[in-house]
């Protein structure tokens, strides 16, 4: 087979073709949709003629595709990196790739995960399903405003809505691998502020099914704090994998997770559920890893009893502030 001149473009059209009964049917649809000649449409599909400008991104949008669906291995390495905010991110595609990355990392020699954050991302709420569900609710109703949830308040109706339970199950499945891999974590006493602020907004707008839901979620947050404290005290994840935890005092501004082993590496940068980015470029992974390790060298470790007590006293204090708000 003749090598494609534009392999990324070819992979995109292969993905588009998979949603049609046949490749000719996909090409015919594309030709009609964009009013192209037959020869030009075939040249695009075969990767023989480049699409102009931002055509790749526009096609992904037009055919409801996510870049992780098409290039799960990541874009080819380059000295120049560009990211595009996903206005309607494909959470299923993201979760599939995350699960695959973690499962592969779990089986790799010398595997280690580094995680740093200023808030608690939904992907780490393995034991607190209701809190994870609440973050999904806030995202769909206040950040993405999906019409299907417009008249649903948070509570059992939302948690039992078709697809929500399955998504949370996938989240837990990904975390099963996460907790099997040794790790280094960087936390901050303000890591719950964003979650607590969202809870208050939903309460003040009367979007809880049950008026007691706010108190119920605060109780879940306190249980989460106890879970985190046990992890830090034991120096181990839920599976027993070794864990070191540091207080980064807000010095690390990005929510990120780096995976590194003898044969694999990746980095996830999370800017909320509307900004989920994944890279596999070695230089980029190493640059972020060097940064957190340099800062980590001067941070207090929570294995120290005094440091741990101060940290969790401050964390409980943030919940006290919001409980009386």
Image (cartoon, grey):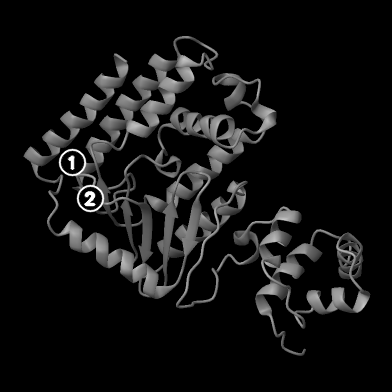
Which residue is rendered at x = 54% and y = 19% of the image? 155
Q: Secondary structure at mark 2?
A: loop
| Front residue of 32 and 218 | 32
Q: Position of residue 66 (x, y in %)?
A: 64, 56
Tell which residue pokes out farthest to the left in this image. Answer: 306
Q: Is residue 320 above or below residue 51?
A: above
* Label 2 packing within 10 angstroms: few (<14), some (14-19), many (20+): some
Q: Earlier in the sequence, mark 1 or mark 2?
A: 1
| Front residue of 280 and 150 | 150
Q: Position of residue 238 (x, y in %)?
A: 33, 44
- In the rendered image, which residue does mark 2 sit on? 251
Q: Position of residue 39 (x, y in %)?
A: 90, 79
- In the rendered image, which residue does mark 1 sit on? 233
Q: CA distance from mark 1 to mark 2?
A: 23 Å
Which residue is rendered at x = 26% and y = 63% of the image? 291
Q: Secondary structure at mark 1?
A: helix
Q: Position of residue 258 (x, y in %)?
A: 37, 60
């Amino acid at each position: 087979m003749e090598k494609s001149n534009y392999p990324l473009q070819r992979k995109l059209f292969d993905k588009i073709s998979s949603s049609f009964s046949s490749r000719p049917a996909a090409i015919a649809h594309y030709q009609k949709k964009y009013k192209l000649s037959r020869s030009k449409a075939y040249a695009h599909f075969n990767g023989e003629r480049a699409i102009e400008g931002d055509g790749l991104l526009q096609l992904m949008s037009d055919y409801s595709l996510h870049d992780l669906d098409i290039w799960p291995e990541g874009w080819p390495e380059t000295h120049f990196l560009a990211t595009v905010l996903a206005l309607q991110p494909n959470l299923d595609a993201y979760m599939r790739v995350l699960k695959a990355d973690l499962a592969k990392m779990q089986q790799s020699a010398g595997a280690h995960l580094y995680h740093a954050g200023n808030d608690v991302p939904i992907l780490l709420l393995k034991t607190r399903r209701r809190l994870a569900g609440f973050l999904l609710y806030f995202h769909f109703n206040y950040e993405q405003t999906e019409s299907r949830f417009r008249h649903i308040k948070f509570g059992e109706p939302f948690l039992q809505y078709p697809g929500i339970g399955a998504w949370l199950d996938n989240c837990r499945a990904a975390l099963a691998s996460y907790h099997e891999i040794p790790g280094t974590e960087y936390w901050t006493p303000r890591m719950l502020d964003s979650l607590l602020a969202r809870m208050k907004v939903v309460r003040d707008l009367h979007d809880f099914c049950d008026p007691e839901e706010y108190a119920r979620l605060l109780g879940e947050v306190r249980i989460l704090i106890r879970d985190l404290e046990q992890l830090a005290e034991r120096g181990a994840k839920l599976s027993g994998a070794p864990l070191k935890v540091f207080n980064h005092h807000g010095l690390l501004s990005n929510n990120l997770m780096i995976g590194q082993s003898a044969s694999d590496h990746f980095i996830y940068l999370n800017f909320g559920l509307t900004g989920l980015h994944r890279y596999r470029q070695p230089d980029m992974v190493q640059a972020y890893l060097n940064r957190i390790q340099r800062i980590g060298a001067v941070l207090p470790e929570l294995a120290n009893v005094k440091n741990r007590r101060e940290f969790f006293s401050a964390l409980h204090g943030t919940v006290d502030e919001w409980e009386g708000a």
